[in-house]
Image (tube, coloured by chain):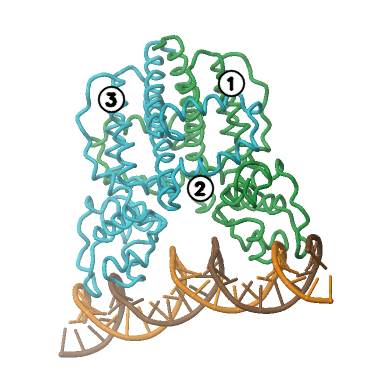
Chain colours: A green, B cyan, C orange, D brown
Amino acid sequence: MDSKSDGSGFDPESVDVVLRLLWREHLEVAPGRRGPRRKLSVDEIIAAGVALADAEGLEALSMRKVAEAVGVSVMSLYSYVPHRSGLIGLMVDEVIGRTALPELPEGVGERLRMISDLLWDEYHRHPWLVAAQSHRPWIGPHTSARYEWELGALEGIGLDDIAMDHTVALVESHASASASNSINAQKLADDSGVSDVDWWNANAPFLEQVMPDEGYPVSGRVGSAVGEAYQAVTSHRAVYEFGVETIIAGVEARLSAPA
Amino acid sequence: MDSKSDGSGFDPESVDVVLRLLWREHLEVAPGRRGPRRKLSVDEIIAAGVALADAEGLEALSMRKVAEAVGVSVMSLYSYVPHRSGLIGLMVDEVIGRTALPELPEGVGERLRMISDLLWDEYHRHPWLVAAQSHRPWIGPHTSARYEWELGALEGIGLDDIAMDHTVALVESHASASASNSINAQKLADDSGVSDVDWWNANAPFLEQVMPDEGYPVSGRVGSAVGEAYQAVTSHRAVYEFGVETIIAGVEARLSAPA
DNA sequence: CCTAACTATGTACAGTGTACGAATTAAGGT
DNA sequence: ACCTTAATTCGTACACTGTACATAGTTAGG
């Protein structure tokens, strides 16, 4: 043990600051610290960040706004949280922890669907989660519990460890990507005040001019069918459903035809 | 025909500016315009934007840098392009046009794989494409040609129009999401100088402390298996491959078991 | 009580997208 | 040839952003 060791067997200096914050509940409370008493807890900051992002999106989450929300000067935040990106990482684990992990049903398909729907719903409850994915994915307590739960749903059904991991990743990818499409479309409509259909109606005459029918035989026909089926340009929810079902069918095919 | 009509049957005022720029090749050249001769073409600006984004990423694509690259003042750009977001839309269609659409092989699986790989490769050639997806998806000539090609690959194999559209969307979603994971990891490693493995090595002792083995039975085992298989924390490419195969299996299952 | 550690805060910097207005250029109408 | 008018270029300005740094104030340990 070196001089800085607290007997836990790792060098506390080299541990990612955000990581220590993520697991703050699992660490002994810090010993009596000098200096002024802290006005806040990290949790208050995280909660304020989540509220702000829920309400106005991640791009509106500025350190100044968070600071104002918790009633502290901007630079004081930096004594709680190392940077904006780290705060976002903490927010992600926080909201993941807010979603309870339900009992798993019987059947592989039912389980995959439950996982997928849980993610889809969560993304729509916190639309900024899709934009948060371009930041470093830190390993927090709730993220870890979620992963354990997801893998547990596939335990003992006949997939090897690698396939279990990749199947979870596939379901997560698909839920994330289709939710992302759905959410971006919604955000664009909100921000610009122009809905999908409005935009299409305004620009259809122009497109008919530059896109002659004979140049797009298949997509012309398919586009019409889609428009007619949903009475809209597209239905993100339907695309999502179709994807989940296809993926489930693929996993089941893998199970019944082992390598 | 109203006073502003050019005989084409649509009101040119209501057409999205970016849309007109996207289809600029298909429009008659503008009649003699007053004012100073333009120093540039839109294409030069788009090309400069693509070069910049390829080299430094989308967040480094500032109007000031683009302006400097083409040798013009910042605000002059705005006489060519309505805003940064529109420029990005034009860049997207441009790079999509740079990828040739190859002959389609026989077999549904082979075709889906070709489409998917084409997208995966394209994302890795232009990593900023993943970040560009949060902007409005304009309908450009190359995007349309791509969509027509993708649908053409599924024509006549036994899917109805809706299923064709959704299958293409599924493959695109999956390619986009897995490429996004791969690219984000790469970018984070580059920017921070800390690789996946380095980070893990530095923080593993801490994680072992806060994550007791008995709390994560399945993910502990699976994580080890994955680490051993790839000699890395994960293999984005392998996850992608697994997903493509599963999706193909799902589509084939759908084909052999009609509703 | 003094010192060393810690917190809170103000200021400052190098950026960002783009609205606005002024100056310049060239074409169309007479 | 001249005037009008549209189009282009460009400088300045504004409201923001994240965060580095220095300073002042507060508390616990020795």
Q: Residue at x 70, y 59 (%)?
A: A69
Q: Position of residue A243 (x, y in %)?
A: 46, 26
Q: Is residue B72 above or below residue B246?
A: below
Q: Which residue is mark 3?
A: B111
SS under mark 3 = helix
Q: Which residue is mark 1?
A: A153
Total numbered labels:
3
| Disc 2 to disc 3, C-alpha distance | 33 Å
Identify the image quadrant of the C terminus of chain A: top left
Q: Is residue B62 above or below residue B203?
A: below
Q: Which residue is mark 2?
A: A135
Tell me whether the residue at label 2 lies in contact with that at label 3, contact meaning CB atoms closer than 8 angstroms. Answer: no
Q: Nearer the viewer, mark 1 or mark 3?
A: 1
Q: Is residue B47 left or right of residue A202?
A: left
Chain letter belonging to callout 2: A
| Disc 1 to disc 3, C-alpha distance | 32 Å
**Nearer to us in this view, A64 or D10:** A64
Q: Is residue A57 left or right of residue B45?
A: right
